[in-house]
Amino acid sequence: MEIRRKATAGTMQSSDLSVTVEPADRMEIRIESTVKKQFEHLIRARIEDVLRRHQVTSGIVAVSDRGALDYAIEARVETALRRAIEE
C-alpha cells in the first residue's frame, strides 16, 4: 500500500487518538501521548503492526494519543491509511 496523500482519522477526546499519515520517502512514526513515558513502546509496536500488515514501507505517521486502547489505535491508523490511498 502506498500513501498517496495526507489523511487523518480520530479525535482528540479522552481515550481516543488522532492519526495523520502523509507521503514521504522514508518511514517515520511520531508519537505524542499523555502516557508516552509508560506506553510509547506499545503504541509504536501497534502502529508498526498495522503498517506491516498493509505493507506500508514509507510515509510519516503522526499520532496524538489521549490514552487510547489497542483496538482504537489499530482502527485509527487503518482508517487514515485507507483514506490516504483513495483516488
Image (cartoon, grey):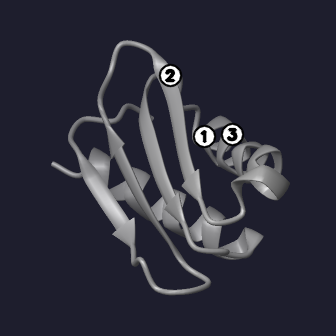
| Contact? badges 1 and 3 (CB < 8 Å) | yes
**Residue ranking furthest to the left:** 87
Q: Residues within 10 Å of mark 3 (few under 14, many from 20)?
A: some
- Dividing the picture into quadrants, the one containing residue 48 is top right
Extreme-top residue of the structure: 25
Mark 2 burial class by Cα count in 10 Å: few <14, some 14-19, many 20+ = few
Give the Cα distance between marks 3 and 2.
Answer: 10 Å
Which residue in the protein does label 2 denote? 27
- The answer to whether mark 2 and mark 1 are in CB contact below 8 A is yes
Q: Residue type at mark 3: give it.
A: Glu
The image position of residue 59, as x and y in percent, is: 41, 28
What amino acid type should be assigned to the residue bearing mark 2?
A: Met
| Depth order, front residue of 18/38 | 38
Which corner quadrant of the image does residue 41 belong to?
A: top right
Q: Which of marks 2 and 1 is in front?
A: 2
| Inter-mark Cα distance, 2 to 1 | 10 Å
Check residue 48 in the rendering and tell me which mark sits there, or answer none.
Answer: 3
